[in-house]
Amino acid sequence: MHKPLDHQNRFAAGRREAGLLELGVCYYPEQWPREKWDEDARRMVELGLAWVRIGEFAWSHIEPQAGVFRWEWMDEAIGVLGRAGLKVILGTPTAAPPKWLVDRYPDILPVDARGITRKFGARRHYCFSSRRYRIEAARITEAMVRRYGENPFVHAWQTDNEYGDHDTIHSYSDEAKLAFREWLAARYGSIEELNRAWGTTFWSMHYNGFEEVDLPNNLVEEPTPTHLVDYYRFSSDQVKSFNKAQADLIRRHSPGRPVTHNFMSQNTDFDHYKVGEDIDIASWDVYPMGGLINGRLSEEEKARYLRVGDPDQVAFNHDLYRAVGRGRVWVMEQQPGPVNWAAHNQSPADGMVRLWTWLAYAHGADMVSYFRWRQAPFAQEQFHAGLLLPNGEADQGYLEVAQVAAEMARLPAGEVREKAPVAILLDYESRFATRALPQGRGYAASAIALDWYCAIARLGVDVDFIGQHSDLSGYRLVVAPDLVIPDMDFLARLKASGAKALFGPRSGSKTRDMHIPADLPPGPLADLIDFRVTRVESLPEFHSEPVLYGNTSHPVTGWRELIRTTETVLATFEGAHRPGSPAVIGNDRARYVATLPRGEFLTRLMGDTLGWAGVASLPDLGDLRLARRGRLRFAFNYAGVPAAVPASASAEFLVGGRTIGPADVAIWMEDEG
Amino acid sequence: MHKPLDHQNRFAAGRREAGLLELGVCYYPEQWPREKWDEDARRMVELGLAWVRIGEFAWSHIEPQAGVFRWEWMDEAIGVLGRAGLKVILGTPTAAPPKWLVDRYPDILPVDARGITRKFGARRHYCFSSRRYRIEAARITEAMVRRYGENPFVHAWQTDNEYGDHDTIHSYSDEAKLAFREWLAARYGSIEELNRAWGTTFWSMHYNGFEEVDLPNNLVEEPTPTHLVDYYRFSSDQVKSFNKAQADLIRRHSPGRPVTHNFMSQNTDFDHYKVGEDIDIASWDVYPMGGLINGRLSEEEKARYLRVGDPDQVAFNHDLYRAVGRGRVWVMEQQPGPVNWAAHNQSPADGMVRLWTWLAYAHGADMVSYFRWRQAPFAQEQFHAGLLLPNGEADQGYLEVAQVAAEMARLPAGEVREKAPVAILLDYESRFATRALPQGRGYAASAIALDWYCAIARLGVDVDFIGQHSDLSGYRLVVAPDLVIPDMDFLARLKASGAKALFGPRSGSKTRDMHIPADLPPGPLADLIDFRVTRVESLPEFHSEPVLYGNTSHPVTGWRELIRTTETVLATFEGAHRPGSPAVIGNDRARYVATLPRGEFLTRLMGDTLGWAGVASLPDLGDLRLARRGRLRFAFNYAGVPAAVPASASAEFLVGGRTIGPADVAIWMEDEG
Amino acid sequence: MHKPLDHQNRFAAGRREAGLLELGVCYYPEQWPREKWDEDARRMVELGLAWVRIGEFAWSHIEPQAGVFRWEWMDEAIGVLGRAGLKVILGTPTAAPPKWLVDRYPDILPVDARGITRKFGARRHYCFSSRRYRIEAARITEAMVRRYGENPFVHAWQTDNEYGDHDTIHSYSDEAKLAFREWLAARYGSIEELNRAWGTTFWSMHYNGFEEVDLPNNLVEEPTPTHLVDYYRFSSDQVKSFNKAQADLIRRHSPGRPVTHNFMSQNTDFDHYKVGEDIDIASWDVYPMGGLINGRLSEEEKARYLRVGDPDQVAFNHDLYRAVGRGRVWVMEQQPGPVNWAAHNQSPADGMVRLWTWLAYAHGADMVSYFRWRQAPFAQEQFHAGLLLPNGEADQGYLEVAQVAAEMARLPAGEVREKAPVAILLDYESRFATRALPQGRGYAASAIALDWYCAIARLGVDVDFIGQHSDLSGYRLVVAPDLVIPDMDFLARLKASGAKALFGPRSGSKTRDMHIPADLPPGPLADLIDFRVTRVESLPEFHSEPVLYGNTSHPVTGWRELIRTTETVLATFEGAHRPGSPAVIGNDRARYVATLPRGEFLTRLMGDTLGWAGVASLPDLGDLRLARRGRLRFAFNYAGVPAAVPASASAEFLVGGRTIGPADVAIWMEDEG
């Protein structure tokens, strides 16, 4: 269970009173000559920045040899920045242990799924299960937080950096194996309970003791899915405890400063809600260009949105991390131009740096920080743009930030993001489940959730994300695209809440032990909506099935379930195979979708569902997106042509106007709250 | 040489008298509570099942710790099933050694081609060359067969499970290296003979002794093909001797019970004929849905046959394993619904479980067993359908089996599959040869053989498979799509047989040492048909060459040979490159095809060839398939629309009628034999 | 810096006086019975061959056990060949160390990027950094050169064989690690200088000593690009010193015989100019069929040129290796028919063996040797054609060589290839740079350089290749498609030379330390043409940008730079993103292209640039290619239809005529020189 700590949101009140966006930047004083620092600090303030993050990769600069500390430069850097008026976010440097440390303790290094040790030379080269690294990470964190915990210029802390980047959550080291066994012993109590849960009567997999259990890599064939999911859970818990150790040290020595971590976009290798319990603000790193290239869209769509990005992926993550931060979300890194790490690295359209900044604010962010101040002329990220070019000239991003800072002055204080009428449920354990048992290449939970989010967004409706632990009060509609493993407690609270619910395929299809429910799927969900799944099939992308919904036939592919139900049938499969079998069913409380609608079918289904739940929506917005924060209304144009903003006649425009061009933004206030 | 053992077909007579199909199911009592067993047994009998296979993954349940045996549950299970009237097939549990055994003797584990040990946690985690595992496999087999060899309810034995699944024939362990050296020493006698055969004057590869020879993995570049083919032969022989050790133990302690092994569809990692010598019945596992997805067809064709499968792949394997079993073939596992292991896992069309059952019978199977009785709600295969849903309800497969059982009652006894007029030669050594030297991505022997089979099947002609060791009497036509390494003995018998022969490209292109024949290809085949191959080229799929055959120009791709011949030219290459060079040649005994015809060209060529050989055929059947067993005639409709059955006016229909719908079957008797 | 040795071109004068093409063949007496040698030698001479290469894979035949030498067969073979009138090229056998040597010293073996040792069983199984292998390679080389250095029949030496084949330049062994550290210490002097160059303030990568530095494999993420490029430089230097050791031994013991090495087509794993400094003649291996299949062209183009090959790839390499050999280029291996190693292995069109031979001569080659005399019926390359079939019959290649030999008799002596008006700069360090930092899948320097070469060739203009060290005198135009790291010295000489220059994108974008220049790209190039690159983007192939050039809009993709300039803008980007930004700029000395033109845009741009530089060109030749050598003019027809040759009315045809068919050649003399 999630036990929110008593320090949670202890910083929320003060910040929310302001309700205004602050800007910041990531800075690496250790990479620049001392003589540039003062001017850099001055220019940051001049640009309108309030925050500066430093230190998160500085370990070898702080402690170049074992026990030899060089704090002077950091003292100086914090002083220069702070005296210029900037609030410093200090990062613990544990994402990049120095070479001397790795050489001294090689078991720090992570091991990949082939069993090959991953070497020093980049970053994140540590195994979360290394007991030695836990000690060393605590040692350097404590040293840093003791030195700067009470520093007047240090206003916040970041733990480590981007947990999960470069596929580093899952390590297959001996240390991980030992820790996994302990974790299993704690979870199951007895080996027989593990044998029961894992179904080891299958394929003669019985274990006589926890010391016999190994990590699920380099097997002849897939391991039992419970083995895999437990390994994912274990790995997730390792991240939580690693992070919590740092957060605890920071709180002990730096009271009153919020702790954050900068998450990655849409990483589901660990349970972000659980890590979120131990921090005060969830921040994340916004890289929409690579997100587009690596993302769910077709090539045709990627070409269309090439320099504006997927119109929903960024907003999705703001809303998700707002939930992870229990209301508080920051952007710790936002790309100010092209980056270096995707298969293709296109430039954002002019205006997008500004648009993304306003988008963050509209979705509840209190702070947006750009990565990075000045482009580095050396090392791995030298093709990564900064606000300044390597020679110090202002680049496009700088100009757009200046514009945002100016526009911000026109906005009223005190506007906060309110609860949305619709909540989307994202459950990390369910993601572990479908990762372990995808049952077909056509099923990708991340893409499905984003598709569903997109359908709601196109209808102009704001969304919150929730986990199963979340408070459900106030929501009119709960949307669960992939709740494979529902909690009884969640279902009880959902029933009590009065919210209507829309469930995607596979909902309720597994128990916590990764078994099929005794009464067939959807297991306990059947209390809410009466049906049974008697067969599932995963379908190749070159085949589609027609579904009749609202007198129109829509093609679906990827997934189809055969269900038996006493509920109202809202859509049916047509075609040669079992024509007439239900595709969407519902009663007055819940609806279930037995396939993967996309495109027009999905938008239409979502529109009808919003109406059914009493949520007001707009006609399909195409490539326009809306958001609201307090009395403020926002519109964002992702199209290549101008768009009309759906503002009332009496709307008061603070930024932009009734028609906005490509990559442009409008902000206005409506009379009705 | 293949030396058929004297026990061969010792069970055939009795079974063939009956000539009727028996049904069965795979069951795992160890996976269910004791209290379900009796009802399960009762329902099996009620459904019309006669056989039940158990035990093949039960090692850790039988011997949970070293030397600690728990036979009681198995005694009980066999008793419950047997007393209900079921004949038990008992599987030796060697496909899944327990964890305690692997921990005690880690050299049991197989090693993959990268040199990485494959770990416990699934199945087939053993190396065929592990001397320790040979001892342990014999120990558990003997223990089991001593206990149940004379059990009145045990009527047959299965050795291990699916040799070759998960790419487990080829292991690169130290144990395999040592065994390979011994195998080479036995094969070649002297290292100089190996040097000659392997051509080690090339690239300075000379060996001074067998102890210098290593396994052919992790090389800088391809090894000499004789090295590879010898490794494939060695690996194949390891399977044979592993299997024979079990069969021998079973025969010693369980006299009178047939031994079988359940082969995989179209696996060519080892010589199935050789393993087949040591068993009494060849059984195989029928999974047409995954077979389609992973198979030879284009995406368009896969979409067309999505829920009925490749119309020829299943029949091909029945005919092949009938040859492996020297006339006796069983289906040990047939999918009763969707499975879990392919890239996409679609549902079979309703009716296909019944169709596949009748197809098996038509192609000579005496027993069809379904995998599995009840869908497991846990472990790796929880998405694999059973006859029953996890909660015990009858699923679609159950209903179709019931229908088959009812229909079977209408059939006369005593009908046996007769020798076909056409034999297709499948030679495993030739498959090793083209695997070692594919000479271009366009050459895939498995797909070619299936294409050729399909062309014959579309013309309504029954087929037998043969190896080079097989008796050729009675065949009018021998078709050899890829006989790369012909035996002199085979060729002599072919000449003596009076059968006509059709050879595909590459026939006779290698000696047993994997050399080009001294007189150029086709080596000794030239005695049968006079030509020489002076050049071969492998062609990319984006290029095709026109071939003029019967006044029509057909495109071919993938493979083209330049040949010189005194024989009649039946088809010629056209186009810019060497126009007029022969594509098909022939005399009155043999024909040779110097390219890879497909589609209409292949069907037409095959039709003409059947006519030339005096084999009666029908016009192209499209998606209808026929078969005959004794006086019985069968038709199977793989099309999406109804099909007319080519029955005579006087035909007596036992199942279905003159027109059958999609996925439907007709069975009738004709007056003429 | 490149320091040409004093022995350079010491053999050039004599050869150039002749100016005629000699022919040769690769032969393996150790692979054939002694009784065939005499006839083979006789037939070689009869065919018109002058040279024969032997020995390069004969180590285990020469020294079958440690210290046991069997020279007799080689004495005999050299004698037989020499007495028949052939000049022997003797290869050192170090490309294939024997098994007994590898077993004795396992640290000879190379290690792949995963850290897995690559085993014996093919060839090139050695690590260039193995100190033991250096000793052993010197030992066998010295033994061989001492025995045959003064042999009257040995006229030339080849070192090793095809450096770089099978990805063997880069080894990740412990030996390589130690050698890399020494190399770094020598390069940087102090670890702090390395830290500065590598930018180790980034990601906490600081090193305290060279002994801490590791090889750049199995990292969590990309290493710093300077780490990678230094590893590439180090690996390249290892090849140079390995080769030089052999060349030095040969020169000491075999005075007066030229030393060559047979390079691979377009391998850029090491600096060929540097290795070329230590040899007398650069030879290379011509395999156009595999070159096409693996090459830059689209599938449509590959189908079109299937049996003639990429019309420019072979000529490109002749011109390149002519530069590597400082004017002297040989073809050591030319394919005489289909080969065995590509994904598809089509036959060359009849005539192509002759065409390629004339092409080599036209581009300056003095000798063309075919691989191989007789097709081997065993081992890895048994599908590789020879001049003779395995049974000794003449194959197509043999007939075409005979034709060339006859035609050669009609040509005048003394014609030498003259300096071309255009030089293309190929800089290996720049290739290392873009390999380390591709910044997008759309950027492939090899394909780009070949595209640019093709555009010049289509306009009938001869080309030389140069490195930055090369003499620039006499060139009217220097074309640099990818000069990422320009030398100051080169730029000074370019300015002084009077040549005009055309630079591709990324030119000048990195310093030698792989940093962005302090003043932004193009760094020192800005002295030549005034602009600054303020942003780069790599673009996916599914998106293109329109560029307006000469009143026509051309689509470009893959790469786009945003530049700021005071120079004349010759082409501009159009479309939605920053329309009007310069795509091509220029002044009276230099032009810069800020994108990757292809097809018609590139041909047009190149035509205009040639005109601007005062280089005469022809209208687009389509699939015809021209070349000149002294007074001789050559035309080569790669089209499927006949082509008219652009000869003057007074041209005197020596081979062919004014119209030539597909795969045909014309040679004529014009009055004007």
Image: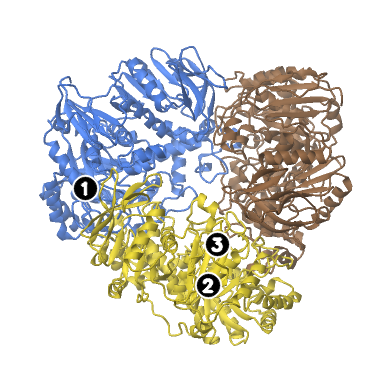
Chain colours: A brown, B yellow, C blue
Relative vertical location of residue B307 with respect to residue C471 in this rendering, above or below = below
Residue drawn at point x = 64 percent, y = 53 percent: A438
As drawn, the label of residue B288 is 3
Q: Is residue A394 visible?
A: yes
Tell which of C557 and C49 is nearer to you. C557
**Marks 2 and 1, Cα distance to the nearest angstrom?**
59 Å
Q: Which of marks 2 and 3 is nearer the N terminus?
A: 3
Task: Give the amino acid at mark 2.
Answer: Trp
Disc 1: which residue: C396
**Marks 1 and 3, Cα distance to the nearest angstrom?**
47 Å
* Chain letter behind tag 3: B
Disc 2: which residue: B668
Tell me whether the residue at label 1 lies in contact with that at label 3, contact meaning CB atoms closer than 8 angstroms. Answer: no
Tell me whether the residue at label 2 lies in contact with that at label 1, contact meaning CB atoms closer than 8 angstroms. Answer: no
Q: Residues within 10 Å of mark 3 (few under 14, many from 20)?
A: many
Q: Where is residue A367 in the image (x, y as percent from the top left)?
A: 75, 28
* Chain letter behind tag 1: C
Task: Give the amino acid at mark 1.
Answer: Gln
At mark 2, the secondary structure is strand
Q: In which quarter of the image is the C terminus of chain A?
A: top right
* Chain letter behind tag 2: B
